[in-house]
Image (cartoon, helix red, strand yellow):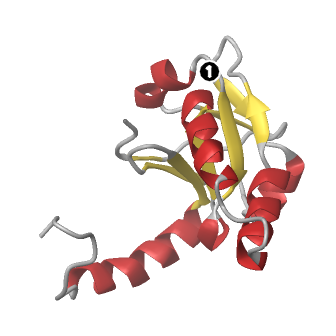
Amino acid sequence: MFLGTHAPKLDDKGRVILPAKFRDELSGGLVITRGQERCLYVFTEREFENLHEKIRQAPVTSKQARDFLRVFLSGASQERPDSQHRVTIPASLREYANLGRDLTVIGVGSRAEIWDTEAWNDNYEKTEAEFSNTDEEVIPGLF
């Protein structure tokens, strides 16, 4: 399970060192793809395969499902960490997420997310206020 907030740097070759707490889970390979809110999603290969199976069940007749598949899968990149636990983030994904040198990597349970630090701080500030003011059940059965 991916948890916590980490602050790695992006090097000149577009590589990031995986947070130590994520290394074991991602050592066998991972998939990086476009996420929502202009971040990147990072999945283990197994989790990505499970997600893909669920996505494949969407009706081909649904334009929204087709559009989601196109955006989500066309940007996906299988990667394998090197001996120094670095992963290359493809240029197209770095551009999509507007990544600068300073990154924020967060654990979101079944996936990690990679954010440009400034974008993460802006997003967090907005969503934390909404989180604090939540007065109805957002996730059924949680609270």
State the residue in front, 95 or 136: 136
State the residue in front, 120 or 79: 79
Q: Quadrant of residue 43?
A: top right
In the image, is 72 to the left or to the right of 119? Answer: right
- Residue kind at label 1, given as amino acid type: His
| Image coordinates for residue 140, horizontal then vertical, percent | 23, 70
Q: Is residue 28 above or below residue 32?
A: above
Could you tell me which residue is drawn at 56 percent across and 62 percent down?
Answer: 117
Which quarter shows the C terminus?
bottom left
Could you tell me which residue is drawn at 76 percent across and 60 percent down?
Answer: 69
Could you tell me which residue is drawn at 35 percent across and 46 percent down?
Answer: 4
For the residue carrying disc 1, how many other residues have a C-alpha within 10 Å: few (<14), some (14-19), or many (20+)? some
| Image coordinates for residue 5, horizontal then vertical, percent | 40, 49
Q: Is residue 15 above or below residue 4?
A: above
Q: Which residue is mark 1?
A: 85
Count the marks: 1
Q: Is residue 127 above or below residue 27?
A: below
Which residue is at the far top?
83
| Image coordinates for residue 102, horizontal then vertical, percent | 62, 54
Which quarter shows the N terminus?
top left
Tell me the SS state at disc 1.
Answer: loop
